[in-house]
Amino acid sequence: MQYGKTAAGVFLARKNRFTALVDVGGREETVHVKNTGRLKELLKPGAKVVLVPAEGPGRKTRFDLVGAYRDGRLFNIDSLAPNKVAAEYLPRLFRNITRLKPEAKKGESRLDFYVEAEGLAEEAPGEKGLPASGGVRAFVEVKGVTLLRDGGAYFPDAPTGRGIKHLDELAKCAKEGYFAAVLFVVQFKGAHFVAPNDETGRAFGEALRRAKEAGVRLLALECDAEEDGLFPGRPLPVFAG
């Protein structure tokens, strides 16, 4: 997933969930923050940030804030980026995809992807016990991860009722015979594993463990975060307890 032109800025303050003040070339600008999460570890006064020119008619801000540096490491915080990266990565999980439907309705939810494929690809992490052929029908839900703590990538950074609903729907899918998976897209480089953030999202962690017990596959992908984009990297283990 690649951006076009980018610009550098210095973070000043967050005005609300959607906007922030950033110094852009010596001028204070109100910018759109492309992530409504807390991001308190990243969006600190003085942090170097990455901006992309805003697109679309009627925009009140000139830039979107899509990345922030912490201790010299770049974190992509664009909430739209994980699904774009996942779409690029799915052919590495599934062999010969014949149908790929984003925002697929299932039950009372819309899950990020519905996939039909001839089988699982050899790279599918943690799935050695499944047949590589015979046809696969799958639902995949994507979660972008921006929180780094003690070498691990943790999700969520705030309570998420919507995320719990998606996990419960995936559990139903698994019981109905679908290949059901949650794919954690880690929007930075250098984490060693992914785990639920039970400190602030205990209910999500409990739902994740229920989903795993029901047969939902827990997958994670480390990404290379660059100023001009976010690119699929290597699989990571998911520890759900």
Image (cartoon, grey):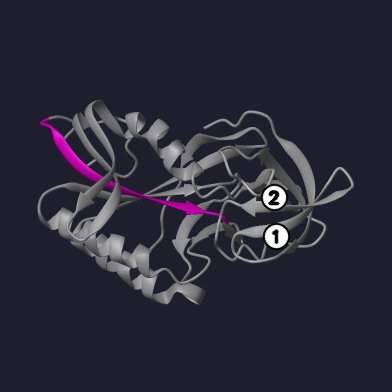
Q: Is residue 111 left or right of residue 196?
A: left
Q: Is residue 137 magenta?
A: yes
Residue type indicated by callout 1 = Leu
How would you rate the neighbour count of disc 2 (Cα within 10 Å): few for under 14, some for 14-19, many for 20 or more? many
Q: Residue at x 41, y 31 (%)?
A: 88
Residue that label 1 marks:
43
Query: Residue sitting at 67 percent across and 48 percent down?
Result: 61
Horizontal side of residue 193 vs 148, given as left or right: left
- Label 1 CA crowd tier, 10 Å (few <14, some 14–19, many 20+): many
State whether residue 182 is above or below residue 7: below
Figure check: 132 above or below 70? above
In what quadrant of the picture does the C terminus appear?
bottom left
Q: In x, y percent, where is residue 143?
A: 42, 53
Contact? badges 2 and 1 (CB < 8 Å)? yes
Magenta-span inclusion, residue 6: no
Disc nearer the start of the sequence (2/1): 1
Compared across the picture, whether 92 is left or right of 12 comes to left
Dot 2: element? strand
Left or right: residue 226 versus residue 120 is: right
| Kind of residue at disc 2 | Ala
Q: Along the line of sight, which residue is nearer the eye, 46 or 220?
A: 46
Q: Nearer the viewer, residue 203 or 27?
A: 27
- Identity of the residue drawn at 27% across and 53% down: 110
Residue 130 visible? The answer is: no
**Magenta range:** 134-146
- For mark 2, what is the residue? 68
Q: Residue furthest top?
A: 96
Query: SS at mark 1?
Result: loop
Residue 212 lies, in percent from the top left, at: 27, 60
Looking at the rendering, which quadrant does residue 133 occupy?
top left
Percent position (x, y) of residue 232? 49, 35
Residue 205 on image: x %, y %:
38, 69
